[in-house]
Amino acid sequence: MGDRVSLELLSDVQQFVFREARLQDDHQYQAWESLWTDDGVYWIPANGDSSDPEREMSIVYDNRSRISLRVKQLLTGKRHTQAPPSRLRRIVSNVEVLGTTDSGDIKVGANTMIFESNLRDDTIWATRNEYALRPQEGELRMAYKKVLLVNNEKALYTLSFLV
Amino acid sequence: MNVMTRASQWGELIRPDRVHGSIYSDADIFEAELKQIWYKTWVYVGHESEIPERDDFVVKSIGPQPVIMTRDKDGQVHLLLNRCSHRGNQVCLADKGNQRTFTCPFHSWTFANDGHLIGYAFPDGYQGQDKSQLGLGRVARVASYRGFVFGSFAAEGPSLEEHLGGAAETIDRLLATSPTGEIEITAGFLKHRVKANWKFILENECDGYHPAFVHASIFSVADSGIGSLYGAKSTAVTRDYGNGHTEVDLRPEFRRIGKPLGWFGTNTERLSDYAGKMRTAYGEQRADEIMIDGTPHVMIFPNLFIAEIQMFVLQPLAVDDTVQHVTALQFKGAPDMNRRMRQQTMGSVGPAGLLLADDSEMYERSHRGVLMREPEWIYLGRGLHRERRDEDGYLVGHATDEVPSRGIWNHYRRVMEAL
């Protein structure tokens, strides 16, 4: 994109993705869910970065109602794989405003490195994230989040925290 | 634990109502299983629809061994090992594709997709060499049951039909729920790794005792109707087909509900295209019977689990390292049904699955459990007092009884003792 990104926009975007990361690390499920627009799509592909989720299996391909179901399940406290919850810290970096989507949302890219410690072991995950963010009532909301795990072509351990 | 090569030892680890915990955790037992089960008996490898065209190939596995499933120029299916006969390099690095030959990148030896050596680079360096002795390694026997391809590393042994026995009927039942009588494996696989022995997974597939507890979280927030199938009052039955094949037969419950597609939590209005094609294919009455009964829930020993709308393939890599490969079943010619099967499968299984992530947590905890010293045994006596024979002579029990586990261990002991 030829246009320069304003510091204000970049700051808003960064604050948003950092806040999302913190809510995920801290298992603030409802606060995290409130970041989504009503038409949000949460997608974690498997088997590479270009599979078609309408034809092929994805690790997560949640529409808004399934995002809500996923959160409700976590909130029961009986989601065994998250009871006790994974201890998590993630670094979000390379936050970049990449332009606008066809529907006018702000297109954002970032990289993350996530350290997970749970009953099985300690695990490091690395991702490329793509977001579509939409200003709504004076705040940004997430209309789309795609998480490309670097190792999504391989067999993966359970990934039951919010990534 | 080299003593395990003596047959009598297995009887000390496997009793009618219990097994010793070390059978899941002992690395020498795992090595013995590779020899006696994975590299000898029939193991499910892949589905013919994954290689529909001539010269198609896809990389599958038998336990820790990667296996290239190819279709040659004459349409015949081969199971080849990915190891160059020269110095052991890998001749295939893609997961799937279409090619007539595989060329080793190390010294350019080239093999046809039926495994035979076509040629090597700079042939002057070899004199009088019989190329027919230098083909790729292969799985000795390949057999297909209605599109499901199995392999056996043993050149001789029971036929695939003998191995499947009564469980073959469950595959027939699955195919009957497709309006064309065919399924397709086209949606790609999720690969879910667990730090646990493969037999915890094998036994759990037809364990009807755990869902009420392991899956309580999702049953309490999603209106799935699955929970009641596995309650104390369920009329569903567990079944031991012999040869290690086990089933949870949910048809009694679905017949009690009596609604076409009730088994899938939907109805013929919402999947009208599928229902219409079923009625055209089978006639209204038969189609409705099939659509009431639904698809099977069956574990074909040792690694093929057909779970209503999805298929799992178990791949043990080490005594405490197992991969579950899982995909949505797809019925040829039923796009509305297929979409729903994909959506439900993606939600419930794989590393983030609303169901399977909890099962996998249990596998890992159980594995850590059997490493503890006491009480040594895994107790599998549930429902022993009420198991009975069905009209076909198979042992059946209540939906929550451990008939399947006991059936698996009976077979396991027999194959492990067969030295």
Image (cartoon, rainbow, N blue to C red):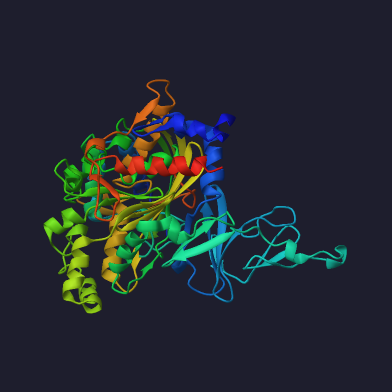
Evaluate whether residue B7 shows in this view: yes
Residue B329, image x, y percentages? 35, 62
Instruction: Locate residue B343 relative to residue A94 in the image: left or right.
Output: left
Report x, y in % for residue A114: 43, 38
Instruction: Identify which residue is drawn at 50% across, 41% down.
Output: B416
Q: Looking at the image, which residue sits at the far bottom?
A: B280
Q: Residue at x 59, y 76 (%)?
A: B73
Residue at the farthest top position: B374
Between B214 and B291, the one nearer to me in the picture: B291
* Residue A106 x/y as whole percent: 34, 56
Near-viewer residue (B305 or A103): B305
Image quadrant holding the C terminus of chain B, namely: top right
Q: Is residue B127 above or below residue B63?
A: below
- Number of marks in the rendered image: 0
Residue B213 higher or lower than B277, as above or below? above
Q: Position of residue B76 (x, y in %)?
A: 55, 71
Q: Nearer the viewer, residue B289 or B268?
A: B289
Name the side, left or right, on which B135 lies relative to B96: right
Query: Which residue is drawn at the image coordinates 83% and 67% (left, top)?
Result: B123
Would you place residue A121 above or below residue A161 in this image? above
For the N terminus of chain B, give its image quadrant.
Answer: top right
Name the residue rendered at 31%, 63% in the picture: B174
Q: Relative to residue B98, is residue B179 drawn left or right?
A: left
Q: Is residue A94 visible?
A: no
Quadrant of the image occupied by residue A25: top left
